[in-house]
Image (cartoon, rainbow, N blue to C red):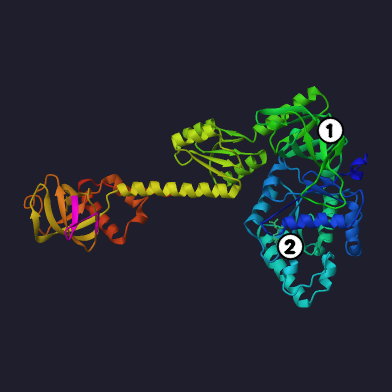
Amino acid sequence: MAEQKTSGRRLRQPIVVVLGHVDHGKTTLLDKIRGTTVAAKEPGLITQHVGASFVPASVIEKLAEPLKKIIPFKLIIPGLLFIDTPGHELFANLRRRGGSVADFAILVVDINEGFQPQTYESIEILRQRRVPFVVAANKIDKIPGWRANPDTPFLISLQKQAQRVREELERRLWDNIISKLYELGFQADRFDRIRDFTRTVAVIPISAKTGEGIAELLAVLAGLTQRYLQHRLRFAEGPAKGVILEIREQPGLGTAADVVIYDGVLRKGDIIVTGGLNGPVITHVRALLMPKPLQEIRVAKRELEPVEEVYAAAGVRIVAPGLEEAIAGAPVFVARDEGEAKQLAEKVRREIEALRIKTEAEGVIVKADTLGSLEAMIEALRKRDIPIRYADVGPVAKRDVIEAVASRELNKFYGVILAFNVKVLPEAEEEAKKHGITIFTNNVIYRLLEDFEKWYKEQVEAERRKELEKLVRPGKIRLLPGYVFRRSNPAIVGVEVLGGVIKPGYPLMREDGKRIGTIHQIQDKGKVIHEARAGMAVAISIRGHVMVGRHIDEGDVLYTDIPEQHAVLWLTKFKSELTDDEMVVLKEIIKIKRKQNPAYAVVLGKPQGAKP
Ligand code: GDP
């Protein structure tokens, strides 16, 4: 492979990722870039990598040829290496201590739809990992009246558009993209109007479908990376450094790791150190596999062939014993000898240890398939202020359920397991069933969190309802003259509800605060009912030591006898649950109660137990 063999290279090719909202055209753009490269027919230079595609500098220069007058530049980087799979999840695995293996990103935004949830998420992730980016304002061919000029640079195609169409493009560019970037604190502009690229995000209008603007996109990427990222791209002839993107079964060869090498040289037979489920893995490279050079890219079926060495930046499949233990997102380092391997293993161990969470505190249990997704889950939970008790890579095992049970003891709403893209082992499932532990599983992070948050809200609401149901509500009734059906044991009388509500089980008191028994049953026209509200006339039976004529009389007014703790809750946490007439009655009850106990239901300062 021509681009691999040059030794004494000064700069390696930048690693570029594509992010953006679903359906905004990430996959189409990557296909277009690959197709453009193939169409440029550079024999021997069209190389595929494992999980990535290389676009040589000569292709970029050729595409940018018509723009020479507008953007003059000479490339000193060998080209650009595009990671083939777009989106958050793979990007998360391109992790590197404190940052990313990706040198640059393209944020794809549909110019017609503008910013969407995953657009914002992408920017958030790029900010966290400190990856610079340009914006590809995609689907310009959908602007009404746009006349497509396939595979033409944007600036040339633009000259051929009607004035009205050009104005519409500007309007959408500003309203849907540039102003949104400003809202997020980024200065941004159309790429050809930018003077200082270190302060301004470049926006490049393109159509991934027609190929318009692809020339500028590649030219701007190449120009920016070689100008501003030279320190990162300086190539070391030394031992390779990389990260595992994916672990795969390689038929006949056992487990292999798809790795992105971002520095140095990797050779067959090298000692490599990486991170595993049960600690660091030290092994020897048995084989390095790369796709065969192709003149035409048929993405579906790319045959791999063994190579002796690869130079950064590269996507390569490594076959080595012990890789079945390795985790995606773990660093890969080449060691010169066994001694250095041990040191590197310690470094890897510490790096992975720093990503795990093991506490005795209340919080959810998190399991994820890769280090990248674990890190992303932890970040997402922290942003939502959801505490984490335990977080690790691997399938959900019995001990995770035991952790969840322990967490539930401290806070019943956090005794759950959030499993991202991992299996639940059968004994864990059994244990969870036994203890009633909920395991949430999903392979989209935000859906997993949404599911949990929905459940959490329901649990909190159910708990609130349950607590509310137990409280005695304010109620005020009057014994109707001429409706005494039975004087005692139990007393049965006709009453009118003057305010609030009465229910069976409620204790009653007189206007002077004297308790006179408990409501046993309520009947309305001979039918048993569960409550009676203001304005209703019903018959009630009263249990307890009460006799009509002695303790109470026709025409008397009675109130529900609200325990002090209930009254406090009505005044604080559940204030919004009372109707206006219930509130009026509550105040009358408190007045009566305070005659006996002046401190009854006095709420000081901040309401206790108010909503969190
Ligand atoms: P992804 O989810 O971001 O990878 O989006 P895709 O690449 O799958 O594109 C989503 C849809 O938009 C597909 O139907 C594409 O054909 C279409 N699409 C992508 N880019 C363009 C474009 O520039 N113009 C038009 N008209 N359609 C596009």
Mark 2 C-beta closer than 8 Å to ligand 1? yes
In the image: residue 467, left or right of residue 38? left
Q: Position of residue 258 (x, y in %)?
A: 75, 39
Work out which quarter of the rendered image holds the N terminus and state it.
top right
In the image: residue 352, left or right of residue 69? left
Is 138 located above or below residue 369 in the figure? below
Is 352 located above or below residue 160 in the figure? above
**Which is the main secondary structure of the residues drawn in magenta?**
strand
- Mark 2 → mark 1, Cα distance in angstroms: 39 Å
- At a point 88% along the width and 36% down the height, the residue shown is 237
Circle 2/circle 1 CB separation < 8 Å: no
- At a point 23% along the width and 45% down the height, the residue shown is 597
Q: Position of residue 38 (x, y in %)?
A: 86, 55
- At a point 64% along the width and 52% down the height, the residue shown is 121
What amino acid type should be assigned to the residue bearing mark 1? Pro
- Residue most toward the top? 339
- Residue most toward the left? 549
The boundaries of the magenta stretch are 520-532
Q: Disc number at residue 590?
A: none
